[in-house]
Amino acid sequence: MNGALSFEEFVGSRADALMRYAYVLTGDPHDAADLLQEALVRVRAAWPGVVNKREPEGYVRTTMARLHISIWRKRRRERLMPEPPERAYDDTALARADGDGGLWRALSGLPPKQRAVLVLRYYESLSDNEIAEVLGISRGTVRSQASRALDKLRTTWRPSVTNGSLR
Amino acid sequence: MTEELEQALRRTFAEAADRAPKAPPGIGLEARPARRTRAYPRVAMAAAAVAIAIGGATVGGRALLTGTHAPGTAKAGASPALHRLKKTAVPPMEKVWPQAIHRLSKKLPNGHAYHPLTFLDDHTLLVSTESSFEKADALYAYDLHKHTARQITTVVTPPKTQMFASYFTTGDGYVAWAIAGHYGGEVWAAPLTGGKAHRVARTGTSTPDHLAIDGGNVYWSLVRSPGVYRAPIAGGDARLVGGTGSEYILQWPWVGSPRDSLGTAAGVRFATAKNVKTGETRSARLTDRAAWHCGPTWCVGQKNFVTEAQRRDGSGRHAIPDVESMSAVPPSLDRFVITSPAGGTIAVYDLETGRIGDLGVTSEKKLPSTWVRPQEPGNPLYYTVTDGGYVLVDLAAI
């Protein structure tokens, strides 16, 4: 059935779910909203093709993952300049909530591509082949990125640590 | 160690997803979201430059997170707020409405992770479990007194489904929900006592939302076009409810218009409301705000970062303790506003009595307003995530 789902309907029903994905990918509520917005703007433009030929949610998630590893990196660098303290993330509260040896915070130190590979592998439970397809990179790159990311996390992560203070 | 680290990553990501903010209303529907004037123009310029570099689409940076503000309210030079509230300590829910707050782990007694959907009674929660990301596979009745979870039904997801089960609602001993896909929209239901789920009706090419169950029928309105429809809960053809050709479900049995589907238009949402059972109609003419959001009785609006409420007839107008100014939805149960007050975290505010109780949300403190968006106005459940689990409020118990 053509046009079973309009873009507005799709967003209305799936925005929160997609926001969760964006948050896991970016690790920051503001970046998550930006990423989702940017992905949806693109998907909206391509909607007729998306809804008729593909599974739209998968398409949006692929778009988000790819955006995250491309332009997002640049934007993050731009963010390094001073920002007002309003809406500041409560890092100390979050660290307390971060029960797995500070893993959530350690993830924020990874380059976007490495983080995206981990999210797709351990959150979305995709195979390395699927990850390669989603991110548009080779399977070898998926493996090397994952391996580097895990190595980096291992330097700070301790399984038994409950108070995740990294610095 | 690798395996252990991998397990920890799975856990960390899943927990983060639980903490994730709700999507800002209207996200993705405007190519150019309203920008908030910022004190750091260099940041905005840098973001704009990147946006141009990626194909002309502008991303409003953090302005997105202020999307709940009515258009135009964030302009520089706007007149100062008249009713800005003083910062006062907000008492905890446990002191104000101890019967209404529940703190729960994020696992059912059987070990499954779950999402709270609504309260079935004062100690039973309807929850869903998921087979994969956001894909509900079963519904449970979670007895908070006995700490037992009883499976009600499995949720069927037909092939080519694009919208997984959503808009869960209960009534008449049933739970109903909506799905949609290449096959169109469908309403499904299952008896709360337990049993197989069945398709109630097809809804055509449009997606149903805002379901209600009443008098042996399931009622719904559609995302794409006005009109309230019904079908017998046992299954049958969808029929338009007489006199609702331009209405949407507001909070059953109230229907109304305009709905303003996704939070971008100015004006009064649900300026007119009609009770389909009694025929009573109500209107609201509130013109001094960019955006009011009306329930059957109360309207909530905001301007200059102050949230206010008044009844449809203009009486009882007062400011709500809310620093985020985010309450851009009709009040829950026509009476409660979820706020982010100065001196508190996330709080429930009672429009009828002016009482307020804080949820004591520890890990989500100081997060953007989108974290506190309530469910649909007829749902007695509000929940969010705090250190160690869910914090739930049964608004019907207040």
Image (cartoon, coloured by chain):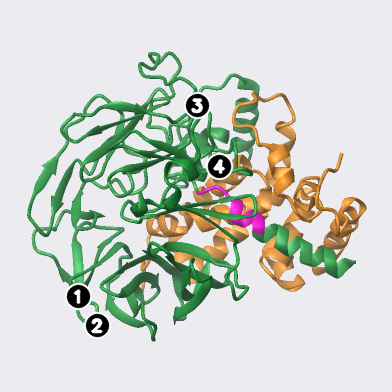
CB atoms at circles 2 and 3 under 8 Å apart?
A: no
Q: Is residue A36 above or below residue B112?
A: above
Question: Considering the numbered disc 1 on the image, is that residue within a helix, a strand or a loop?
Answer: loop
Q: Colour of chain A?
A: orange
Q: Percent x, y for residue B240?
A: 15, 67
- Name the residue tied to disc 3: B36
Q: CA distance from mark 4 to mark 1?
A: 40 Å
Residue span colored magenta? B15-22
Q: Amino acid at mark 1?
A: Gly
Q: B290 left or right of B257? A: right
Q: Is residue B283 above or below residue B386?
A: above
Q: Amino acid at mark 3?
A: Arg
Q: B299 left or right of B96? A: left
The chain ID associated with circle 3 is B
Q: Is residue A49 visible?
A: no
CB atoms at circles 1 and 2 under 8 Å apart?
A: yes
Q: CA distance from mark 1 to mark 2?
A: 8 Å
- Name the residue tied to disc 4: B360
Q: B36 left or right of A83? A: left
Q: Amino acid at mark 4?
A: Gly
Could you say which is closer to the camera, residue B361 or residue B353?
B353
Q: Is residue B332 visible?
A: yes
CB atoms at circles 4 and 1 under 8 Å apart?
A: no
- Name the residue tied to disc 2: B234
- Name the residue tied to disc 1: B216
Query: Of helix, strand and loop, which mostly describes the magenta segment?
Result: helix
Label whose residue precedes the other's in the sequence (1 or 2): 1
Q: Nearer the viewer, mark 4 or mark 1?
A: 4
